Amino acid sequence: MEMDFERCYRAVDSRDQRFDGWFYTGVTSTGIYCRPSCPATTPKRQNVRFFPSAAAAQGAGLRACRRCRPDAAPGSPQWDVRADVVGRAMRLISDGVVDRDGVPGLAARLGYTERHLHRMLRAEMGAGPLALARAQRAQTARILIETTGLGMAEIAFAAGFGSVRQFNDTVREVYGIAPSELRTARGRHQAPPGAGTITLRLAYRPPLHAQALLDFLAVRALPGVDEVRDGTYHRGLRLPHGTGQVALTPADGHVAATLRLADLRDLAPAVARCRRLLDLDADPAAIDATLAADPALAAAVAAEPGIRVPRAVDGFELAVRAIIGQQVSVTSARTTLIRLLAAPGSTEDHVDHEVDGPNGDPVAGQPHDQHAGNQPGLLRGFPSAEDVLGKPDTAFGMPVGRRETIRGLARAVIDGHLDLAPGGDREETVRRLLALPGIGPWTAGYLAMRAFGDPDVLLPTDLAVRRGAAALGLPDDPKTLSTYADRWRPWRSYATIRLWRAA
């Protein structure tokens, strides 16, 4: 949204939580910055400034409000879905690229000079890449201080700071108190048991249709990779510094996340990937308003507000899933994927058969609770491109052409020709995908929607989409449906999910 003073001030005066993360409110008389929904007394107009990012507010010398905790607000929807350089940069910064590779590494990933990248981010975010990464490090440090029993020196380096002094200075500047005082102020909260275990809340803009997310993920769950059990989604993660596991439980106003990390430096990337997976930075009010304007979708939107697009934590994994899922049912694709994962060479790395049922299939009629009768097993991330490329022919269980498509995909990822990370160039990646033998518009569109976060993808040739359209009284001919769907722009990805549910 534009930084229009009157519009922003009205949102603050009404304490409208829908605007949390869109902008930040700086109060010059108190020297703090807040989220728009802060319950404190509305400040006087002459004492208010609005900022596009927490980093910009910190750069103006303001500290974070301890009451509304603006650093824990949902991310801005525009940076989550925008495909331009600034949007890509924000996604890469949230994934920890600056902490790992510095600003030169970020600029190289985006194909711009450091100077030009700094200028673009300053113009739109009010802060450069270092300041944006610093704000994220401060938030990571606060989480570790409040949810673990680690020493301050360990937290400093786990959060990405170069020194303990830098850590101390930043925490004092951002939160107004020393790190040790921040830990004392957490009160009744206790550090969870187990080294590398962190529990936190992932905020979102309501409404959130959590059951739709769990249903979607459950029927596609793979043994040893992910599972849905007792209303919680469990997932193995491959992260920049090691592996991890996460348990995500939707709750009122937040998603409870319990992370077990081999290396605590992976906290920020893990959180960013979990937020993307559940589409927690979306603006459901804007999406539902557009879709509800179509009488054909109005009843579905009213019955199920807050439908999100289930995204991905691993672009390569989703690409393999999409290729295997071409022109076959979800059940058949899952069976083929289980066979691939269990093939010699990585069985011990990726599969724990105790976490799945005897047939590896979800319980009929209960897709969101498919493993309720089993004990949880160790979950690990999906095999890497190198792992998949090394699989023998017998592991694939599919036509030769499709097998070679997966291998071609793996080679393209390994040699850097294909960037399936969230900060990749969306249009260029789709173009390169379509150039690979065996990948057509459906596969590329599916990846654009779920892996790259494009909010405006329609899959008109998809059988389930066409069935859902027919069920709602809409045209089910691909060409006619595509024309009709123009009224759903720029949220056709969300309409696609609703059509799938209608089917």
Image (cartoon, grey):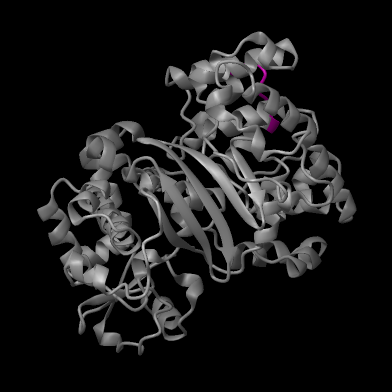
Where is residue 64, by image quadrant?
A: bottom left
Where is residue 443, by image quadrant?
A: top right
Q: In this view, does 286 lie to the left or right of 237?
A: right
Q: In this view, does 425 lie to the left or right of 484?
A: left
Q: Which of 205 and 231 is in front in this view?
A: 231
User: Principal SS element in the magenta part?
Assistant: loop
Q: Which of 159 and 459 is in front in this view?
A: 159
Q: Position of residue 57 (x, y in %)?
A: 25, 67
Is residue 191 among what the camera can see?
yes
Highlighted magenta segment, given as a residue range:
436-442
Q: Where is residue 492 in the image (x, y as percent from the top left)?
A: 67, 50
Residue at the extreme left: 165
Quarter of the picture holding the N terminus = bottom left
Q: Is residue 280 left or right of residue 267?
A: right
Vertical placement of 383 versus 173: above or below?
above
Vertical placement of 203 versus 401: above or below?
below
Vertical placement of 379 versus 249: above or below?
above
Q: In this view, does 129 lie to the left or right of 391?
A: left
Q: Does the magenta stretch include residue 183?
A: no
Q: Which of 267 and 108 is in front in this view?
A: 267
Q: Position of residue 437 (x, y in %)?
A: 64, 15
Is residue 307 among what the camera can see?
no
Q: How many marks?
A: 0
Q: Where is residue 58 in the image (x, y as percent from the top left)?
A: 22, 65
**Residue at 51%, 22% in the rendered image:** 385
Where is residue 425, by image quadrant?
A: top left
